[in-house]
Amino acid sequence: MRGAGSTLGVLGGMGPAATAEFLRLIAHRFPATRDQEHPRVLLLSEPGIPDRSSCVLTGDDAPLPQIREGLSTLVSWGADLLAVPCNTAHVFIDRFRQELPAPLVDIVEATLATAVSRGAGASWLAATSGTVHGGLYQRRALDLGHRLLLPEPHVQEGVETTIRLVKMGRTEQAAACMTTVARSLWRTGPFPVIAACTELPLAYEAAGLPPDMAVSSLECLASSCVDTLLARAGRR
C-alpha cells in the first residue's frame, strides 16, 4: 500500500532545475522507510510554456492556456492534488483557480505562512519582476498583516540575473549574484529574504548564506504538499 492515499500531480519545467529540486524535497521530507510508503507523484515537465514574468509585464496571456491544459492533463492521468513549483505561474492560475478539477497546494500561501511564523514582522520579497508586478505576495501579505519590502530597481536587476543564471546551469555565478543581492537588502533592513522564485533557493543554498535569513518558496511548497498528503492518508 502506498504511504499516502492521494496522487500528487506536479506541473513543472518552469524551470527544470527547480522542478528537480522540488521532487527531491518531497522525497526527502516524506516520512517513509521504503519505496512503497512514498506518495505517488505524476510529473508533467513542460519547459515550453512561455516565460511567465515577461508575459505578465507585457499583458500577454500566452502561458495561461498551456498551464490550464497541463493541470487538466495531470488530473486526467489520476492526480487528485496539484502543485506548480513556479511562483509567477500563479498569476495566471489565480484567474481560473475556481475551475480546477482538483485542489491546488498554493505556493504563495505556504510561503507567507512560514514567513509570518518567523516573527520578524517584515520580509524582503525576492521574485521575478512579473511576480512583483502581479502583486501575488503583496495582496496576501497585507491580509496577514505582514510587511513586505521590495528591492530597489538596481537590486531587482540582480534578482533577475540570479534567476537567469540558475536557468542556464551557472550555479556558481548565480550564487555570487545572490550573495550581492542579499547583502544589499540586509544593509537596508535585516529581515529574512523570501525566495519567491523557485530558482532563487538553489542560488541561495549554493552561496552558503544564513539559512535562517531566507524563506524558500520551494521548501515551503514541498512541506505543504507533504503535510496535505499525510493528512489525507490520516497520518497527520
Image (tube, rainbow, N blue to C red):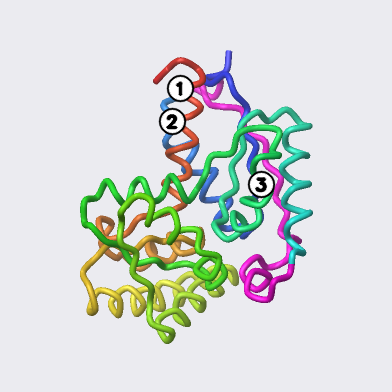
Please identify the quarter of the rendering in which residue 159 is found. Answer: bottom left
- Disc 1/disc 2 C-alpha distance (Å): 6 Å
Image position, residue 227 (x, y; %): 43, 30
Using the image as rendered, state which of residue 19 and residue 236 is in the foreground. Answer: 236
Q: Which one is earlier in the sequence, the residue at label 1 or at label 3? A: 3
Residue 227: assigned label: 2
Q: Which corner quadrant holds the N terminus?
A: top right
Around disc 1, counting alpha carbons within 10 Å, would you say few (fewer than 14), some (14 to 19), or many (20 or more)? some
- Disc 1/disc 3 C-alpha distance (Å): 22 Å
Around disc 2, counting alpha carbons within 10 Å, would you say few (fewer than 14), some (14 to 19), or many (20 or more)? some
Q: Is residue 88 above or below residue 45?
A: below
Q: Is residue 220 above or below residue 173?
A: above
Image position, residue 45 (x, y; %): 70, 50
Secondary structure beneath dot 3 equals strand
Question: Is 183 placed left or right of 49 in the picture?
Answer: left
Residue 231: assigned label: 1
Residue at 64 percent of width and 44 percent of height: 97
Q: Is residue 99 above or below residue 79?
A: below
Residue at 43 percent of width and 60 percent of height: 201
Image position, residue 137 (x, y; %): 45, 58
Q: Are marks 1 and 3 in contact (CB under 8 Å)?
A: no
Write down the residue under mark 3: 11
93 falls in the magenta region: no
Which residues fall within the magenta stretch?
33-60
Q: Is residue 216 above or below residue 223?
A: below
- Disc 3/disc 2 C-alpha distance (Å): 19 Å
Question: Is 62 placed left or right of 86 in the picture?
Answer: right
Residue at 65 percent of width and 37 percent of height: 9
